[in-house]
Amino acid sequence: MKTKILIIVLIISLVKCCQSHEIITIDKLADTTKITSHLTNITKTDKPRNYKNLSTLNFVADYIYKEFKTYADTTYYQKYDVKGNEYKNVISIFGSENEKTIVVGAHYDVAGNQQGADDNASGTVALLELARMLKGQKLNYRIELVAYTLEEPPFFRTKQMGSYIHAKSMKDNKVDLYGMVCLEMIGFFDDAKNSQTYPLSILKLIFGNKANYITMVNKFGKGKFARKFSNQFKSKKLIKTKNFISPASLQGVDFSDHLNYWKFGYSAVMITDTSFYRNENYHKKTDTMDTLNIPKMASVITSVYLTLINLK
């Protein structure tokens, strides 16, 4: 019953927010049942999906590949070697007929021995749902969905990050990359007072003390793509959204895969629930799927989808 009510609310919201008057069918809404199923399959593995457990990483990569292949124009692994071990990004492409590319990415590995439901199964599952929703859709851009490996320590900020490998390949192959969207922890929300913290205490006066919104994180000089994507996402009004723009040096602003696209001069935005600034389960064994707000996750995913298909 709750799922049916959520779908009705989403449909009403979509009718109000889509100025193009496009007819949105049920299959183009993020599905909470599918989200739950994907979260279960990705988080409840025998061993954590960290860099030491190659068999688990490969199991998850193969799961993502199978889902991508069901819907995408093209699906493939981007393999690379680290100290004699093979790791792989999983890539799917939609709208192959278009020249200009938008990358939407999320990492599927975890830090240490934990399930990593929010960090970052939530972002990975968003990719899987986006793949389903994008199938057969007329697109204005070539869209590349990328599930990255090795985002977490000890590889964070190194050239072994899956996103560094991918971003560099974009530059080396002179891909006409319009911009990148990083999905980094999108499932934790809390309406309690003082549930939200910030790197600077003064920000609480600006953004509030409740962890009940999703954030579009941009740096100064963010570029045309990040600006347009953030504004259009917020305009959908399916979920409370706040734009956060700061120097790239502020703690947390570049704490994910978008940092590698910034390194190569691309416009990129991170969509996040603000990670450890609200979610005390960050990098702990308590980061389990029962702590996530799946209906709000669905709203985030649907908003990304609507922004992608309407972006000019």
Image (spheres, grey):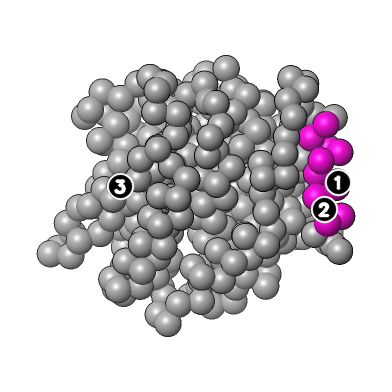
Determine the image quadrant of residue 311. top right
- Prevailing secondary structure class for the magenta stretch in the rendered image: helix
Kind of residue at disc 1: Val
Disc 3 to disc 2, C-alpha distance = 34 Å
Q: Is residue 121 visible?
A: yes
Disc 3 to disc 1, C-alpha distance = 37 Å
Query: Residue at (36%, 61%) from the top-left corner?
Result: 61
- Give SS at disc 3: strand
* Quadrant where the image shows the N terminus: bottom right
**Disc ID at residue 9:** 1
Q: Nearer the viewer, residue 149 or 133?
A: 133
- Give SS at disc 2: helix
Q: Answer yes or no: do the residues labelled 1 and 2 have beta carbons within 8 Å? A: yes
**Disc ID at residue 76:** 3
Q: Which residues are magenta?
A: 4-15
Ranked by sequence position, the earlier of labels 3 and 1 is 1
Kind of residue at disc 3: Tyr
Q: Can you identify the residue that label 2 sits on?
A: 6
- Residue 5 lies, with reference to residue 173, above or below; the image says below
- Residue 105 lies, with reference to residue 102, above or below; the image says below
Kind of residue at disc 2: Leu
Does 8 lie within the magenta span?
Answer: yes
Query: Residue at (40%, 23%) from the top-left corner?
Result: 97
